[in-house]
Protein backbone atom coordinates (compact mmCIF):
# COMPACT_ATOMS: atom_id res chain seq x y z
CA UNK A 1 0.00 0.00 0.00
CA UNK A 2 1.25 3.50 -0.84
CA UNK A 3 0.63 6.67 1.15
CA UNK A 4 1.31 10.04 -0.48
CA UNK A 5 1.19 13.24 1.56
CA UNK A 6 1.75 16.80 0.41
CA UNK A 7 3.78 18.78 2.95
CA UNK A 8 3.38 22.55 3.03
CA UNK A 9 4.87 25.10 5.42
CA UNK A 10 5.57 28.78 5.91
CA UNK A 11 2.88 30.20 3.64
CA UNK A 12 3.15 33.58 5.38
CA UNK A 13 -0.10 34.98 3.93
CA UNK A 14 1.11 34.57 0.34
CA UNK A 15 -2.18 33.49 -1.20
CA UNK A 16 -0.75 33.77 -4.73
CA UNK A 17 1.83 31.10 -3.93
CA UNK A 18 -0.67 28.97 -2.00
CA UNK A 19 -3.11 28.94 -4.92
CA UNK A 20 -0.34 27.78 -7.26
CA UNK A 21 0.84 25.04 -4.91
CA UNK A 22 -2.68 23.72 -4.31
CA UNK A 23 -3.33 23.65 -8.06
CA UNK A 24 -0.03 21.86 -8.63
CA UNK A 25 -0.62 19.15 -6.05
CA UNK A 26 -4.15 18.46 -7.29
CA UNK A 27 -2.70 16.55 -10.23
CA UNK A 28 -0.16 14.72 -8.07
CA UNK A 29 -2.77 12.38 -6.60
CA UNK A 30 -1.86 12.90 -2.96
CA UNK A 31 -3.87 11.33 -0.17
CA UNK A 32 -3.78 14.43 2.01
CA UNK A 33 -2.05 17.65 3.01
CA UNK A 34 -0.20 18.51 6.21
CA UNK A 35 0.66 22.11 7.07
CA UNK A 36 3.65 22.85 9.31
CA UNK A 37 2.65 26.36 10.34
CA UNK A 38 3.44 30.05 9.94
CA UNK A 39 0.42 30.29 7.69
CA UNK A 40 -1.03 33.77 8.12
CA UNK A 41 1.69 36.21 9.22
CA UNK A 42 2.98 38.56 6.55
CA UNK A 43 2.36 41.90 4.76
CA UNK A 44 0.32 40.16 2.09
CA UNK A 45 -3.21 38.71 2.29
CA UNK A 46 -3.72 36.98 5.65
CA UNK A 47 -7.51 36.69 5.56
CA UNK A 48 -7.62 35.54 1.94
CA UNK A 49 -5.01 32.91 2.82
CA UNK A 50 -7.10 31.74 5.76
CA UNK A 51 -10.19 31.47 3.57
CA UNK A 52 -8.26 29.49 0.97
CA UNK A 53 -6.96 27.06 3.59
CA UNK A 54 -10.46 26.56 4.98
CA UNK A 55 -11.60 25.32 1.56
CA UNK A 56 -9.01 22.53 1.60
CA UNK A 57 -9.31 19.21 3.38
CA UNK A 58 -6.02 19.58 5.27
CA UNK A 59 -5.31 16.58 7.49
CA UNK A 60 -3.39 18.53 10.14
CA UNK A 61 -2.24 22.12 10.57
CA UNK A 62 0.14 22.95 13.40
CA UNK A 63 1.26 26.30 14.81
CA UNK A 64 4.38 28.17 13.85
CA UNK A 65 6.16 30.81 15.89
CA UNK A 66 4.63 33.68 13.93
CA UNK A 67 1.17 32.17 14.23
CA UNK A 68 1.73 32.38 17.96
CA UNK A 69 2.95 35.97 17.60
CA UNK A 70 -0.45 36.88 16.17
CA UNK A 71 -2.66 35.54 18.95
CA UNK A 72 -0.27 36.51 21.75
CA UNK A 73 0.20 40.09 20.52
CA UNK A 74 0.20 42.82 23.16
CA UNK A 75 -0.57 46.50 22.66
CA UNK A 76 3.16 47.16 22.82
CA UNK A 77 3.74 44.58 20.06
CA UNK A 78 1.12 46.20 17.86
CA UNK A 79 2.66 49.64 18.32
CA UNK A 80 6.17 48.36 17.59
CA UNK A 81 5.43 46.05 14.65
CA UNK A 82 3.25 47.62 11.93
CA UNK A 83 3.06 44.38 9.95
CA UNK A 84 1.66 42.56 12.98
CA UNK A 85 -0.95 45.27 13.47
CA UNK A 86 -1.94 44.98 9.81
CA UNK A 87 -2.22 41.19 10.01
CA UNK A 88 -4.49 41.34 13.05
CA UNK A 89 -6.72 44.01 11.47
CA UNK A 90 -7.00 42.01 8.27
CA UNK A 91 -7.72 38.68 9.95
CA UNK A 92 -10.37 39.55 12.49
CA UNK A 93 -11.40 37.34 15.39
CA UNK A 94 -12.27 33.95 13.91
CA UNK A 95 -8.95 33.24 12.14
CA UNK A 96 -7.00 34.35 15.21
CA UNK A 97 -9.02 32.01 17.40
CA UNK A 98 -8.34 29.22 14.88
CA UNK A 99 -4.61 29.86 15.16
CA UNK A 100 -4.74 29.76 18.95
CA UNK A 101 -6.41 26.33 18.90
CA UNK A 102 -3.84 24.68 16.63
CA UNK A 103 -1.48 22.11 18.18
CA UNK A 104 2.26 22.82 18.48
CA UNK A 105 3.14 19.30 17.28
CA UNK A 106 1.24 16.34 15.86
CA UNK A 107 1.58 12.77 14.67
CA UNK A 108 -0.05 11.51 11.46
CA UNK A 109 -0.20 8.05 9.91
CA UNK A 110 1.21 6.81 13.26
CA UNK A 111 4.83 7.22 12.17
CA UNK A 112 5.18 10.83 10.96
CA UNK A 113 5.97 13.51 13.56
CA UNK A 114 5.18 17.16 12.76
CA UNK A 115 6.79 20.23 14.29
CA UNK A 116 7.42 23.77 13.10
CA UNK A 117 10.92 24.26 14.46
CA UNK A 118 11.89 21.40 16.77
CA UNK A 119 9.75 19.13 18.97
CA UNK A 120 10.44 21.43 21.91
CA UNK A 121 10.58 24.88 20.32
CA UNK A 122 8.93 26.74 17.46
CA UNK A 123 11.84 29.20 17.21
CA UNK A 124 14.86 26.87 16.97
CA UNK A 125 15.97 25.46 13.63
CA UNK A 126 16.14 21.67 13.64
CA UNK A 127 18.48 21.12 10.70
CA UNK A 128 20.46 24.35 10.37
CA UNK A 129 22.96 26.17 12.58
CA UNK A 130 23.33 29.90 11.83
CA UNK A 131 25.77 30.94 14.55
CA UNK A 132 28.55 31.67 12.03
CA UNK A 133 26.25 33.90 9.99
CA UNK A 134 25.72 31.29 7.27
CA UNK A 135 23.25 28.40 7.54
CA UNK A 136 25.03 25.07 7.84
CA UNK A 137 23.54 21.63 8.40
CA UNK A 138 23.85 20.60 12.03
CA UNK A 139 25.79 17.52 13.05
CA UNK A 140 23.79 14.35 13.52
CA UNK A 141 24.41 14.52 17.25
CA UNK A 142 22.98 18.03 17.42
CA UNK A 143 19.91 17.06 15.40
CA UNK A 144 19.24 14.01 17.56
CA UNK A 145 19.60 16.09 20.71
CA UNK A 146 17.04 18.58 19.38
CA UNK A 147 14.67 15.72 18.53
CA UNK A 148 14.38 15.11 22.28
CA UNK A 149 13.73 11.41 22.02
CA UNK A 150 11.20 11.55 19.18
CA UNK A 151 11.52 8.14 17.55
CA UNK A 152 9.08 8.47 14.65
CA UNK A 153 10.54 7.13 11.40
CA UNK A 154 9.79 10.47 9.71
CA UNK A 155 10.04 13.95 11.20
CA UNK A 156 8.64 16.92 9.28
CA UNK A 157 9.77 20.44 10.18
CA UNK A 158 9.61 23.94 8.71
CA UNK A 159 10.71 27.37 9.96
CA UNK A 160 13.95 27.75 7.97
CA UNK A 161 12.26 28.09 4.55
CA UNK A 162 15.08 25.92 3.13
CA UNK A 163 14.05 22.61 1.49
CA UNK A 164 16.17 19.83 2.91
CA UNK A 165 16.18 16.08 3.52
CA UNK A 166 18.47 14.52 6.12
CA UNK A 167 18.59 10.81 6.91
CA UNK A 168 20.10 9.95 10.29
CA UNK A 169 22.20 6.88 10.97
CA UNK A 170 19.32 5.31 12.90
CA UNK A 171 17.18 5.47 9.75
CA UNK A 172 15.08 8.46 10.78
CA UNK A 173 14.21 10.77 7.90
CA UNK A 174 13.95 14.50 8.61
CA UNK A 175 12.25 16.57 5.91
CA UNK A 176 11.84 20.33 5.57
CA UNK A 177 9.64 21.14 2.54
CA UNK A 178 10.80 24.75 2.31
CA UNK A 179 8.44 27.71 2.20
CA UNK A 180 5.32 28.08 0.10
CA UNK A 181 5.33 31.85 0.37
CA UNK A 182 8.73 33.36 1.26
CA UNK A 183 11.84 31.91 -0.43
CA UNK A 184 14.29 34.26 1.28
CA UNK A 185 14.59 36.36 4.43
CA UNK A 186 17.19 37.75 6.78
CA UNK A 187 17.32 37.98 10.55
CA UNK A 188 19.54 39.31 13.33
CA UNK A 189 18.75 36.79 16.08
CA UNK A 190 20.98 35.19 17.34
CA UNK A 191 23.36 36.75 14.78
CA UNK A 192 22.88 38.45 11.41
CA UNK A 193 22.23 35.84 8.71
CA UNK A 194 20.28 35.14 5.54
CA UNK A 195 18.13 32.23 4.41
CA UNK A 196 17.97 32.13 0.60
CA UNK A 197 16.67 29.72 -2.05
CA UNK A 198 17.99 31.78 -4.99
CA UNK A 199 14.75 31.43 -6.94
CA UNK A 200 11.25 32.84 -6.38
CA UNK A 201 9.45 29.49 -6.72
CA UNK A 202 6.92 28.32 -4.17
CA UNK A 203 8.19 25.18 -2.45
CA UNK A 204 6.49 22.13 -1.02
CA UNK A 205 7.22 18.40 -0.78
CA UNK A 206 5.54 15.08 -1.40
CA UNK A 207 6.23 12.24 1.00
CA UNK A 208 5.39 8.73 -0.18
CA UNK A 209 5.59 5.45 1.69
CA UNK A 210 5.68 2.25 -0.31
CA UNK A 211 6.99 -1.29 0.10
CA UNK A 212 10.62 -0.18 -0.22
CA UNK A 213 10.52 2.74 2.23
CA UNK A 214 10.03 6.50 2.09
CA UNK A 215 10.35 8.61 -1.04
CA UNK A 216 10.59 12.40 -0.90
CA UNK A 217 9.97 14.67 -3.86
CA UNK A 218 10.88 18.34 -3.46
CA UNK A 219 8.62 20.50 -5.62
CA UNK A 220 9.19 24.05 -6.90
CA UNK A 221 6.20 25.82 -8.43
CA UNK A 222 6.23 28.93 -10.59
CA UNK A 223 3.57 31.53 -9.81
CA UNK A 224 2.93 35.26 -10.14
CA UNK A 225 5.55 36.18 -7.55
CA UNK A 226 5.79 39.73 -8.87
CA UNK A 227 2.19 40.38 -7.83
CA UNK A 228 2.96 39.17 -4.31
CA UNK A 229 6.17 41.22 -4.18
CA UNK A 230 4.41 44.36 -5.35
CA UNK A 231 1.73 43.90 -2.71
CA UNK A 232 4.42 43.66 -0.03
CA UNK A 233 5.87 46.94 -1.32
CA UNK A 234 2.50 48.64 -0.96
CA UNK A 235 2.59 47.58 2.70
CA UNK A 236 5.99 49.23 3.14
CA UNK A 237 7.93 45.96 3.25
CA UNK A 238 10.61 46.20 0.58
CA UNK A 239 12.55 43.47 2.39
CA UNK A 240 9.72 40.98 1.95
CA UNK A 241 9.30 42.12 -1.65
CA UNK A 242 12.98 41.47 -2.35
CA UNK A 243 12.88 37.95 -0.95
CA UNK A 244 9.63 37.03 -2.67
CA UNK A 245 10.64 38.44 -6.06
CA UNK A 246 14.13 36.95 -6.25
CA UNK A 247 14.69 34.30 -3.59
CA UNK A 248 17.64 36.42 -2.46
CA UNK A 249 18.28 39.09 0.15
CA UNK A 250 20.50 41.96 -0.92
Image (cartoon, helix red, strand yellow):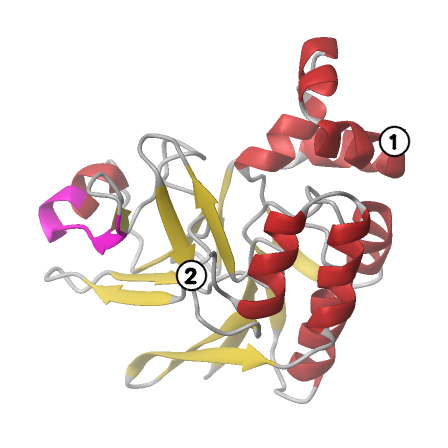
Depth check: give the residue in front, 146 or 29: 146
Q: Nearer the viewer, mark 2 or mark 1?
A: 2
Element under label 1?
Answer: helix
Residue 6 showing in the rendered view: no
Element under label 2?
Answer: strand
Picture coordinates of residue 92, whole percent (x, y): 89, 32
- Residue extending furthest toward the front: 250
| Residue 138 among those drawn in magenta | yes
Residue 180 showing in the rendered view: yes
Instruction: Return the mark for residue 89.
Output: 1
Q: Is residue 40 left or right of residue 133?
A: right
Q: Is residue 124 above or below residue 214?
A: above
Residue tagged 2 = 196
The numbered mark, 2 or 1, whose residue comes first in the sequence reads 1
Picture quadrant where residue 119 is located: top left
Instruction: Return the mark for residue 106.
Output: none
Picture coordinates of residue 17, whole percent (x, y): 70, 68
Picture coordinates of residue 111, whole percent (x, y): 38, 58
Residue located at (33% from left, 85% from top) = 211
Residue located at (66% from left, 19% from top) = 72
Q: Is residue 81 above or below residue 110?
A: above
Q: Which residues are magenta?
A: 134-142
Depth check: give the residue in front, 107 or 182: 182
Judge the density around disc 1: few (<14), some (14-19), many (≥20) Cα neighbours within 10 Å: few
- The answer to whether mark 2 and mark 1 are in CB contact below 8 A is no
- In which quadrant is the N terminus drawn? bottom left
Inter-mark Cα distance, 2 to 1 = 29 Å
Picture coordinates of residue 74, whole percent (x, y): 70, 12
Depth check: give the residue in front, 57 or 200: 200
Residue located at (58% from left, 47% from top) = 37
Q: Is residue 233 left or right of residue 37?
A: right
Amino acid sequence: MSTRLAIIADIHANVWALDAVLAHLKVREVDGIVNLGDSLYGPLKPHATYERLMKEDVLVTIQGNQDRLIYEASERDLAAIPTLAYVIRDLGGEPIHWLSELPRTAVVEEDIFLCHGTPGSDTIYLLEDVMDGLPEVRSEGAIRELLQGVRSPVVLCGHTHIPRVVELSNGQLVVNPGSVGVPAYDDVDPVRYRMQNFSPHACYAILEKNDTGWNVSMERVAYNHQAAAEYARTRGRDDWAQGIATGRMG
